[in-house]
Image (cartoon, rainbow, N blue to C red):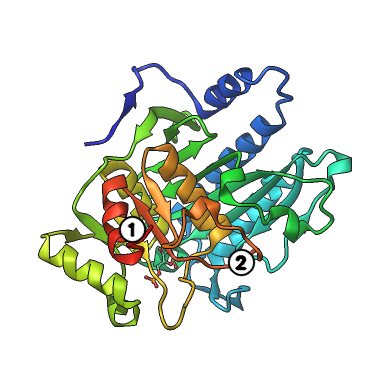
Amino acid sequence: MTTGESVPNNLYSLQSHILAEESRHPGASGDFSWIISAISLAGKAIAHRVRRARLENALGDEGSTNVQGESQQRMDVIANEILMRCLGTRASIAVLASEEDEEPTILRRGSDGGKYCVLFDPLDGSSTLDANGAVGTIFSILRNDAAVESAEATICQPGRQQVAAGYILYGPSTAFVITTGAGVSLFELDPFVGSFILVKRDLQVPTANRVYSVNEAYTQSFPAEYQSYLSWAHASKYSSRYIGSLCADVHRILLNGGVFLYPPTISHPSGKLRLLYEGNPMAMIMEQAGGLSSCGAQPTLDVQPTKLHQRVPLILGSRDEVQAVLRHVAPRS
Ligand code: P6P
């Protein structure tokens, strides 16, 4: 079912892939490669801690709440610290922004060599960890605009400006999915080698698959047009899959097709998911894989952000399936 070019049986690591990408850009300084290398290192360290979390009594609430007013899980804090420690040493980073921190962290300004901004959700879906659920790290990389003084203003760029995006899914295996704007590549961590090994390049999300992914418990709280889509899907014999962990739901759709929806609800009128470090990276992955991503009114990647932690409705996945939703949600688009 999964389309994309299978890689012959040679060992081709994420490091090799990024260096090969770098060589496609004459004059590249290697700064960008160092950032991906830091994210890869953080992913391996987080994978190790996630798999030992129960043994190390690292599950459950930290006893604090994050900027969203949600209870922080101990593993959220651990993953955030690992990412900060791995990325904070990279000289090419100007600003780091995390779901776990109210304000961005300014490492250096453009005049000091800070070329990039890195945004991340360190451990999305962490509340499912105590039930051994799949969780993920989501990342987005933007160019830093040295002329913009405010760190928050610097990172409030439309998703179409991303230079790279992806996620690391900590499931039965540790998968690293990344795009730098030239297609989507899938790597799997080989714990014996200690490297992410390329298994698929130029992944293409299937154009259709009658599977939708939404938390139907909130159906009565969705706008009428989303309820109309769900009624149509039920009548059209769709099936439903919902893990409640964005990386896991997106990964299934990337490989098998379907559509993920997080509509506006009464408690979250702009949807629950965050634009800058959840919606935009997943939207770039989907578009690069031939799929679509929309907030209902416009493509996700065209939304002009105004706040670091702003939320956005999300409809993403197979081209035909997203268009089927939009025929109900945005019929004149
Ligand atoms: P709900 C996890 O808390 C998360 O941020 C995403 O990973 C997931 O897609 C969504 O929230 C699930 O939200 O309201 O269905 O529990």
- The local crowd at label 2, few if under 14, some if 14 to 19, many if 20 or more residues have their Cα within 10 Å, is many
Relative to 117, 252 lies left or right: left
Mark 1 lies on residue: 260
Up-down relation of residue 211 to residue 217 (above or below) = above
Along the viewing direction, whichever of 153 and 245 lies nearer the viewer:
153
Residue 113 in view here: yes
Residue 42 in view here: no
Along the viewing direction, whichever of 272 and 301 lies nearer the viewer:
301
Q: Residue at x 54, y 76 (%)?
A: 70
- Residue 8 point in image, percent of width and height: 34, 17
Badge 2 element: loop
Up-down relation of residue 293 to residue 129 (above or below) = above
Q: Residue at x 60, y 18 (%)?
A: 24
Q: Is mark 1 within 8 Å of ligand 1?
A: yes
Q: Amino acid at mark 1?
A: Phe
Q: Quadrant of the C terminus?
A: bottom left
Residue 231 position by quadrant: bottom left
**Residue found at the very far right of the displayed protein:** 111
Q: CA distance from mark 1 to mark 2?
A: 21 Å
Q: Quadrant of the N terminus?
A: top left
Badge 1 element: strand
Mark 2 lies on residue: 309
Q: Residue at x 27, y 52 (%)?
A: 321
